[in-house]
């Protein structure tokens, strides 16, 4: 057996070959991209979806599957970045859409009964005194911050490196992104989960601090979970500084029946919501303490304005209410996230000792490729400096060939109704050493110093059967 290690040059050769196969397998997506660049900068209107050499163009979704323009079928692990929880053709969703269209109509330009019904359900489910709706999670966080600043009379907000709170509220590299709003008003703390550093940073801004904004699990940052001790510590520090504690649950509210914060015993002053809570339609919301939310009460002189043509769109209100009350019940929530935990735990066990590691909670999973196979990931800094993006890209190309649709950055959002066989059989092949492996990934992913992948179980790695792939798409 060979004792050679996989050099960066070899990985680049494998990556180049995978890209050639991708181009050859997807001529219709390539053609669609070439058309799109004529009217859209870069050929898209959503930066995350851009991939090189061109993005796949999906033409259809049904249940937990999607089909691209060239007819290839995929298990949907993108899950619309947590918004696609219900899949693509749930009969209850279809019935709610038709009912709203036939019996209510579109955009009535007034308050409606279903606006109140959905609000009441959100308040009950997520333990809120009051709530207001928006169109996106980005809007929800913007209005939450504006409300916190108005309530406290202060400007500064503490956030955390790796945090993402919307299109103009991103802190992935430890500083506000160039397109962020109010860039000078944010204090970015390095070391998510670092209690001492975080508490010190919050205390240092006492007197100037309007709020502390944090995700209970950093979604865009790699599905890195905040410890209960960390989250409680910064909540207490925020209150000691006279600031509001704002919990971003845009992604994480689906991880427990009443949201992740409630599960961890937190008591945020404001919670932000979004994604799946519109039932597949654009949605966001922010809510919390009655006295804090009163800053948006139009009956009170000096209150803040909060407008938005589609905030209470009839379709969103009807479908959002129906899906949360009839499909994603507390019981379904618990069972679904337990299923996700079991899947992730098996992946973690199988991948132990390789350059691939997994993080996450419940139905949300993050994949990380690092030179040393880091297993203890508490913040983005643990992986950022030793990340192997070449392996991550190679993995993505080969996952497509195996029929799994996921984000190139390695984020998995599971979809309700995904057959167990797709997880327990096909999904576990990602890291199952008992299955035939792609030669390109087989050697590349093993840690330095190990012999041939097959010599030891600890060399478990990503698995693909290429017996039907050479020269074309999977059989």
Image (cartoon, rainbow, N blue to C red):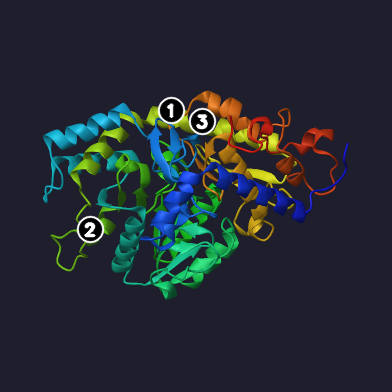
Residue 39 seen anywhere in this rendered image of the structure: yes
Q: What element carries label 2?
A: helix
Crowdedness near tag 2: few (<14), some (14–19) or many (≥20) residues, C-alpha within 10 Å: some
Label 3 belongs to which residue? 338
Q: How far apart are marks 2 and 1 (CA)?
A: 40 Å
Residue 371 image offset from top left, x and y in percent: 73, 53
The residue sitting at 52% across, 61% down in the picture is 172
Q: Are marks 2 and 3 in contact (CB under 8 Å)?
A: no
Label 2 belongs to which residue? 294
The residue sitting at 41% across, 53% down in the picture is 247
Residue 359 image offset from top left, x and y in percent: 59, 44
Q: Are marks 2 and 1 in contact (CB under 8 Å)?
A: no
Crowdedness near tag 1: few (<14), some (14–19) or many (≥20) residues, C-alpha within 10 Å: some
Tag nearer the camera, 1 or 3: 1
Q: Is residue 116 left or right of residue 203?
A: left
Q: How far apart are marks 1 and 3 (CA)?
A: 14 Å
Residue 85 seen anywhere in this rendered image of the structure: no
Residue 272 image offset from top left, x and y in percent: 36, 52
Who comes first in sequence, dot 2 or dot 3? 2
Who comes first in sequence, dot 1 or dot 3? 3
Residue 109 image offset from top left, x and y in percent: 11, 51
Q: Nearer the viewer, residue 103 or 199?
A: 103
Q: Which mark is residue 417?
A: 1
């Amino acid at each position: 057996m060979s004792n050679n290690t996989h050099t960066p040059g070899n990985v680049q050769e494998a990556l180049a070959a995978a890209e050639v196969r991708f181009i050859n397998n997807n001529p219709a997506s390539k053609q669609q991209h070439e058309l799109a660049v004529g009217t859209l900068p870069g050929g898209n209107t959503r930066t995350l979806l851009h991939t090189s050499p061109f993005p796949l163009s999906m033409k259809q979704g049904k249940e937990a599957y999607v089909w691209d323009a060239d007819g290839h079928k995929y298990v949907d692990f993108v899950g619309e970045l947590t918004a696609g929880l219900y899949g693509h053709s749930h009969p209850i969703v279809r019935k709610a859409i038709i009912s709203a269209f036939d019996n209510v109509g579109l955009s009535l330009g007034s308050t409606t009964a279903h606006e109140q019904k959905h609000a009441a359900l959100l308040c009950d489910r997520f333990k809120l005194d009051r709530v207001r709706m928006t169109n996106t999670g980005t809007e929800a966080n913007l209005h939450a911050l504006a409300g916190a600043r108005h309530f406290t009379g202060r400007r500064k907000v503490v956030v955390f490196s790796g945090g993402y709170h919307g299109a103009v509220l991103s802190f992935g590299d430890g500083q506000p992104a160039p397109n962020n709003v109010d860039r000078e008003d944010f204090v970015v703390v390095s070391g998510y989960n670092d209690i001492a550093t975080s508490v010190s940073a919050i205390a240092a801004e006492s007197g100037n601090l309007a709020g502390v904004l944090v995700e209970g699990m950093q979604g865009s940052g790699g599905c890195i979970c905040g410890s209960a001790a960390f989250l409680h510590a910064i909540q207490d520090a925020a209150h000691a500084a006279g600031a509001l504690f704002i919990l971003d649950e845009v992604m994480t509210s689906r991880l427990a029946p009443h949201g992740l914060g409630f599960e961890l015993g937190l008591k945020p002053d404001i919670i932000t919501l979004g994604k799946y809570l519109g039932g597949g339609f654009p949605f966001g919301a922010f809510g919390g303490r009655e006295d804090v939310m009163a800053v948006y009460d139009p009956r009170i002189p000096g209150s803040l304005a909060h407008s938005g043509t589609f905030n209470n769109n009839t379709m969103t209100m009807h479908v959002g209410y129906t899906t949360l009350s009839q499909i994603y019940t507390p019981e379904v929530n618990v069972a679904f996230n337990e299923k996700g935990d079991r899947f992730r735990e098996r992946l973690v066990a199988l991948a132990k000792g390789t350059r691939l590691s997994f993080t996450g909670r419940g139905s949300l999973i993050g994949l990380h490729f690092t030179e040393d196979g880091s297993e203890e990931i508490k913040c983005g800094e643990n992986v950022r400096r030793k990340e192997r993006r070449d392996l991550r890209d190679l993995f993505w190309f080969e996952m497509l060939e195996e029929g799994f649709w996921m984000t190139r950055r390695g984020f998995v959002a599971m979809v309700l109704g995904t057959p167990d066989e797709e997880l327990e059989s096909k999904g576990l092949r990602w890291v199952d050493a008992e299955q035939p492996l792609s030669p390109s990934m087989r050697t590349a992913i093993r840690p330095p110093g190990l012999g041939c992948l097959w010599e030891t179980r600890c060399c478990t790695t990503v698995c693909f059967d290429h017996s039907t792939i050479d020269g074309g798409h999977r059989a």
